Image (cartoon, rainbow, N blue to C red):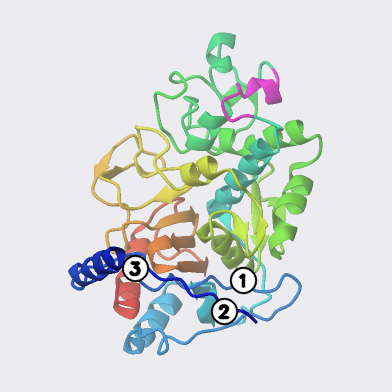
Amino acid sequence: MIRQTFYLPLFLFVLLMVACSSNDDSEDPILDDPSPALYFPPLTSSAWETVSPEELGWNDDATPNLNALLEEKGTKAFIILKNGKIAMETYFGSFTRDSIWYWASAGKTLTAFTVGIAQENNLLSIDDPSSQYLGEGWTSAEPEKENAITVRNQLTMTSGLNDLFFDCVTPDCLRYTADAGTRWAYHNGPYTLLESVVSAAAGTTFSSYFNTELRDKIGMNGFWLSTNGKNNVYFSNTRSMARFGLLNLNMGVWENTVILGDMDFITSMSTTSQNLNLSYGYLWWLNGKGSYMVPGSQTQFNGLLIPNAPPDTYAGLGKNDQKLYIVPDQGLVIVRMGEDAGEDQAGPSSFDNELWGVLRDLIGY
């Protein structure tokens, strides 16, 4: 073996030493330890590495308060991932790791991700008129108004259709209220029809496309089921929701497999998507903005969506307090499944802030 030795000229050596000494009291991102690599559980096994709160330096004295709150509020399952490893996993009553529960509107995030995959596969563009996939007359609006509604409007809750007919997916009650893009309103009907958009674009059922392109590639289980004859809801075990959260934490890549590589779309899901409700992305709720709106209201509230949560938190939020929180700066994915924790509504509730008050004591951010 031949070892080559390289010598720096004297003046370069002096410059290097001066540069290093001048940075002694400052943080140099090049010299800092890199962020911990994310752990990904195997696709076809129940194995999942764990890390204890003590190892993470968390305040374990806060754990009893957290468990008491979760149990009091009807929680069935709760998971915290730290950099992909399970830091906490708790089940209540007869609920187990294998039990199936519904995501409610937290499952909207799955639909958004699937639309992104379909666009990356050149099956659709979110700037296309929705009528290109749903057909003319999918609403009762005048053709000019209907054709102005795009797939992007469906993703951002800005279709301009009347949200009083909340779950309706038929033309008679998909009624014009405002021009597309000028009014934000949380509305299940246009959202639900994103499934038909993907189905028409892909030439197969939405469930089949979702299972092949997303679910099976990251080891999730679960299925879509209509609970009211109009809107489909996703059901799975709790770890499957955690897997999807981990995929989003890693910006659409599962270990070494790219599930969604469109960084513009990935970023847009978790950043403000329009200037009407700053706390809404592509079917994700966003913390850290200056104002927010809530389902069923046209009022704009000042302040943070979840004041106790880290500002970079974004979330899938569903009826009866189904929760999927992602906190990129902390490397956290947090899942809560269960019964209504006090407010029977979709989207954000007071429980979000109450829960994060206890989580702040535990994690210490």
233 and 363: which is toward the camera: 363
Q: Residue at x 61, y 71 (%)?
A: 40
In terms of sequence position, does the residue under pointer 2 or pointer 1 come before the other?
A: 2
Residue behind mark 3:
356
Q: Quadrant of residue 349?
A: bottom left
The quarter holding residue 53 reads bottom left
Span of residues in magenta: 125-135
Disc 2 element? loop
Look at the image and tell me whether residue 321 can be seen.
Answer: no
Is residue 134 one of those drawn in magenta?
yes
Q: Amino acid at mark 1?
A: Phe
Which residue in the protein does label 2 denote? 3
Residue 73: image location, x then y, percent: 42, 72
- Classify 114 as above or below 243: above
x and y percentages locating residue 169 in the rendered image: 63, 32
Our reading of the magenta stretch's main secondary structure is loop
